[in-house]
Amino acid sequence: MQNRMEPLRCGECAAQVLVQKNSWEHTSIQWNTDAHRRCPVVRDDDGRDGRPGAPRMSCTHLDAAIAKAAASGVIEVFDDTPIRAPIVQ
């Protein structure tokens, strides 16, 4: 199966983004203008890493919607093998 972005709507602000869950630890999110305008967390952010205008890639509400969608199978997790904890010697 080929990895692809899937639409997902935030339950809090109704922003719809495209999401791809490559693994439980890695999520790609593609924002569009409408989603950016709808999400108050992204819209009101002053920038990321000191770069005004650089959008935040996510918010806690969207993160929760993605986690719920992945856990319930709505969004496919392409590699669902958990990352092993490093061995400390």
Image (cartoon, rainbow, N blue to C red):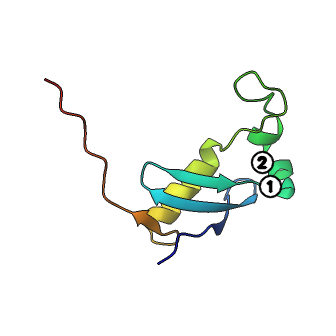
- Three-letter amino acid code at the position of disc 2: Cys
Residue drawn 31% across and 52% down? 82
Q: Residue at x 80, y 55 (%)?
A: 35
Tell which residue pokes out farthest to the bottom in this image. Answer: 1
Query: Which residue does the numbered mark 1 point to in the structure image?
Result: 35
Query: Residue 33 placed where, x, y %?
Result: 86, 54
Identity, as a three-letter code, of the amino acid under mark 1: Ala
Residue 72 as seen in the image, left or right of residue 52: left
Question: 17 left or right of 73?
Answer: right
Picture coordinates of residue 40, whole percent (x, y): 79, 42
| Residue 55 sits above or below residue 37 on the image | above
For the residue labelled by badge 1, is the local secondary structure a helix, a strand or a loop?
helix
- Which quarter of the image is occupied by the C terminus? top left
Q: In percent of the image, x 31 and y 58: which residue is there?
A: 81
Residue at which label 2 appears = 39
Number of the front mark, 1 or 2: 1
- In this rendering, is residue 10 above or below 76? above
Residue 2 drawn above or below residue 61 = below
Q: Name the one closer to the observer, 32 or 38.
A: 32
Crowdedness of circle 1 by 10 Å Cα count: few (<14), some, many (20+)? Answer: many
Question: Residue 50 location, x and y as percent?
Answer: 75, 21
Question: How many residues crowd around disc 2 within 10 Å: few (fewer than 14), some, or many (20 or more)?
Answer: many
